[in-house]
Amino acid sequence: MADYRELRQVRARFPERIAEVAAARRRRPLFRARGQLMIIAADHPARGSLAVGGRPLAMGSRVELLDRLLVALRRPGVDGLLATPDVVEDLLLLGALDDLIVIGSMNRGGLQGAVFEFDDRFTAYDPGAIARMRLDGGKMLCRIALDDPGTAATLESCGRAITDLAGSGLVAMVEPFWSSRAGPDLSPDGVIRAVNVAQGLGATSAWTWLKIPVVADMERVMRATTLPTLLLGGDPGNAPEVTYAAWRKALRLPGVRGLVVGRALLYPPDDDVAAAVDTAVALLEPA
């Protein structure tokens, strides 16, 4: 485990350094030779979602999470990070985000298990901060629950954020779910409904990307949109071969531009982060 004493010292005594490092960060184009991306996600903790497998507080240690992120982000073929400001700023100060795509996570207000879980307020990044920090885009959760009045405010907020990000030429990554208190509808029909609502948000869709789960009948799901789409990599569980085969098949569909995977790669059962990341990168279309 790394020694983070210097990071803590900078945070306590020189907070202005975060903006300085962000201003100096070397950026890169979204795509290089390969037409698909591998993005590592680390925005779960801000919603109180810390469990991995049977470990309820697996993501509770920030220093352990940073250790794992540093391994993952250094692996060949990894293109970027999706995270909340606290994680992004730690990694900026550690010098780990040069030449990577950085997507800021925006609405983390719907805490897991709360009575207000569907009130997905924008409590982290906003479009202005994403532009000022020279990030490459913003990601927003868009849960659509017909029986929860909080959905209306979520849709309005997401639409406004998409418009504002597009005005700055920044990607708006929308993660839509047709949802209820019982959980998201992960049937093909449910995902298709969510996609159609999400892609209509905002005054323009020119900079909108989708982030959707891999479900059954992905061929039909992907016919629901012409927008660039990243696949949400879920937990491979006890049948990783089946999960990876489904990811590989979905990655070959028109419009699919890569994977966004978090806990499954950062906290694999054998704790070999490098091997887990390498396995996922190998699923992408070759350059």
Image (cartoon, rainbow, N blue to C red):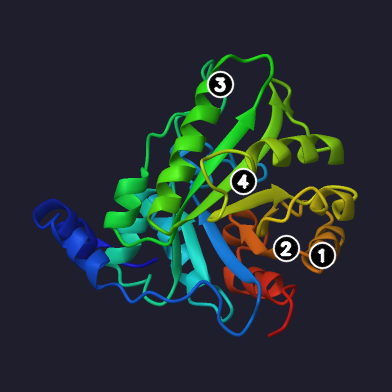
C-alpha distance separating marks 3 and 2? 29 Å
Mark 1: amino acid: Leu
Residue 108, position as x, y percentages in the image: 46, 36
Neighbor class of circle 1 (other Cα within 10 Å; few <14, some 14-19, many 20+) is few
Residue at coordinates 37% horizontally, 46% vertically from top-left?
127
Residue 155, compared with residue 138, is above or below; it is above
Residue 217, compared with residue 72, is above or below; it is above
Give the mark nearer the N terminus: 1 vs 3: 3
Q: Which residue is mark 2?
A: 256
Mark 3: amino acid: Ala
Quarter of the image where one finds residue 70: bottom left
Neighbor class of circle 4 (other Cα within 10 Å; few <14, some 14-19, many 20+) is some
Mark 4: amino acid: Val
Q: Which residue is mark 4?
A: 52
Q: How many marks?
A: 4
Residue 137, position as x, y percentages in the image: 45, 56
C-alpha distance separating marks 4 and 2? 26 Å
Nearer to us of marks 4 and 2 is 2
Mark 2: amino acid: Val
Nearer to us of marks 1 and 4 is 1
The answer to whether the residues at label 2 and label 1 have Cβ atoms under 8 Å apart is yes
Residue at coordinates 68% horizontally, 85% vertically from top-left?
287
On the rendered structure, is 211 left or right of 17? right
Give the mark nearer the N terminus: 1 vs 4: 4
Give the mark nearer the N terminus: 3 vs 4: 4
Residue 243, position as x, y percentages in the image: 82, 58
Give the mark nearer the N terminus: 3 vs 2: 3
Q: Which residue is mark 3?
A: 152
